[in-house]
Amino acid sequence: MSTVSRRNILAATAGLAAVEVLGRPYIANAQAKTATIWVGQGFVPQEDAALKETVANYEKASGNKIEYSIMPFMALYQKSISALTSGDVPDLIFSDAPTVILPVNAFNDRLADMTDVVETQKGKFTETALLSASFYNGKLKKRSYYMAPVKQASAPFHVWGDLVTKAGMSLADVPNRWDERWEWFKKVQEPLRAQGGRKVYALGLQITTVGPNDGNNLFYHFLIAYGGGNIVSKDGKLNTADPKVKEAAIRAVEQMTRAYKEGFVPPEALSWNDADDNNAYHEKLFVMSFDGTLSPELAVITKRPDDYQNNMRILGMPTGLDGKPVPAQVGAGGGFCPKAGKNTAVAKDFMKFFITPEVMNANLKGGLGRWCPSIPAVVKNDPWWTDPKLDPHRSIYVQTTVLGPTIPNYIGFNPAIGQVNAEQLWGKCHANVLKNNMTPQQAVETAFKRAETIFNKFTFEG
Amino acid sequence: MSITQQVLPIEQAARIVPRTRRAWGGGAQRGDFYWAIAFALPYVGVLLAFVVYPICYGFWLGSSPALYEELFDDPTYLTTVVNTLIYVVIGVNLKMIIAFLLSGFFYRKSWWTKYLLVIFILPWAMPALPAFLSIHWLLMGEWGFLNALLHQLFGFEGPHYLTERWSGVLSNISAYNWKNTPFWTLIFLAGRMAIPTDLYEAAAVDGAQRFQMLRHITMPLMAQLYLVSTLLATVFALGDFNSVFFVTGGGPAMSTEVMATLGIRYAFVLGDPPLGVAAVLTTLPLLLPLVLLLMRLLRKQEMQL
């Protein structure tokens, strides 16, 4: 019988320590520190619970401490902008869709470079996720990663399947071409109105001039479907002089305003805010819309389970004019560090932990799949994301958002697009046609002229 | 020791202090002077931290001339200036006239007006956000309560209040006035109650009619209160964000924005706080004379009420 010597104990201890370190190389364990992070509140309580669990796991593994504040999305957005402006910042901001904050502050050199964080999982991310995390620094005159991507979302078609059936039609017949799909859904309106739905509309087309996001997203997808996706190229250039882009924009405005004039779109859509279309959809006041994330469905998952399981349906992307599937324009979320943060090293270490596939998966599943992982292997290796038997919507959404063709939001290419969106230039195009008697061409030319003025303020080199 | 006993020596001491020249520190003893400083310091600190610093920081943020070039280059800016002027000039005056007239109604001595007054002030007591959101839904063209009611009662489809500029501006002004008119009505009611009833009785003896009493007693005596209230209401209206943001959201096509909402849009939608501050600072040429006039009126020794 062998005896356990002091040397054995020391060797075993050293071995365990080595496993601990090598097993989690991303954890900076040298000295326990505290990082302050701000996080957007989850859409469902499970999302917040998942985050708290992730933080607890990280603290246990690293010995570091994370002091987090969870706040509503808009409050986080405004607080982040104020903090970055004043310099009184947290160490990490974790946000769903920091669309304007990132490009503007990266351009102004107010964010810490996150390349070392992204590098730990770089080969696993989608190209779209990496492009969404890359921004131009106007001071250093180069692009770099300023966000550690965690999640991405797209806009699927949301349909009340029971209303389609009530109209005597079948979802199995929905065309797979962009234009034909919109035209097909127009046909549901008349039968529904004949059955007493006085105010039922076929399309919840958000041609809104109020914003902030829905109208812009919708316009860009019409533009992409019609071959004008290159309106802003990866190098940050605005390509409004490209005849293909202009033609696509005119066609997009013409199609959307025609549907409005024909009476298939609620007139109030011109002034909808982000909540109005969701409210109207939940009241079954229109049959189909094209809107971001699974939130319209998830909002009723507990209160109206029958609607969630049986009546609501989502559809993936159809093909565009070129016969190829229209790529979904994806919004990305993740963590970014203000440059003036005091404990950036700990914040980055936490993000390295967060973007490991296992942690990312556990966290996003807590959000019930409203946001998808930025790493395709996560959804491929876990049937929770892709098995249609487990959920009627999620597998289609994952296919559209992660596994199918995607492109990043233009905001990563040039901060100017943030101002174009904020000024609701595309919504104004529709309004100019509908209220000011402009032709779609005149409206597009007016918007393009303004967009060119805005883009001229941001000069890129290299 | 009674309060009188405490006060008397202080009064006597005050008489001894020569009044010809006011000493620095108010002529207080050194010990009293230090106490005075100690008591004043927290207030000065609060003033510096929460008033002076934010104002200076705001001016610093909005100090670059380039911001104003960008601002004036934005086609929305001019529309916003016009809307803001309509909002404060027409909106505020309409509200104050209505409040003045309603204060006369609530001054009546019947029992039921007291109960009606309680109901009337409810909009003012309500939190702004749910109130304006409710109005937004009320005015929704397709599914709003107002048009549904019109359809039920008269069988016709009402207009789309939120998709046209002028009906949008009117909706915002109406919402804001609905919320704030009760407050100013109460102020004017208090003003009316402070007028000695002898004056009305004497006028009645002289055979004056109601309109003559209004013209020659009420209006002259309440003129200064009305003016001060109107100036205050104008300053409040210039800074109002909630009603426009929640009723029309600045739409359609940003045609109903006012300066407060445009500033917030620049700051937090565009992510450019300095531009937002610059937008708000452009209201200063209108705001400063109003505040100066207000201060001047409030410093007058002889107030009418």
Image (spheres, rainbow, N blue to C red):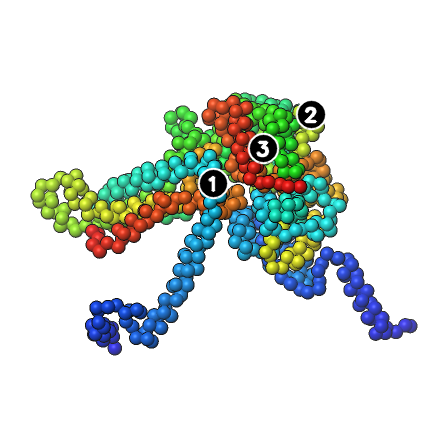
Q: Type of residue at label 1?
A: Glu
Q: Type of residue at label 3?
A: Leu
Q: Quadrant of residue B8?
A: bottom left
- Residue B69's disc is 1
Q: Mark 2 and mark 1 in contact (Cβ < 8 Å)?
A: no
Badge 1 local density, few (<14 within 10 Å), some, or many (20+)?
A: few
Between A95 and A421, the one lying in front of the other is A421
Q: Mark 2 and mark 3 in contact (Cβ < 8 Å)?
A: no
Q: List x then y, in percent, for residue B229.
A: 29, 47
Badge 3 local density, few (<14 within 10 Å), some, or many (20+)?
A: many
Instruction: Name which residue lies at 26% across and 46% down.
Output: B227
Task: Read off the chain for label 3.
Answer: A
Q: Which residue is mark 2?
A: A322
Badge 2 local density, few (<14 within 10 Å), some, or many (20+)?
A: few
Q: Type of residue at label 2?
A: Asp
Q: Which residue is mark 3?
A: A218
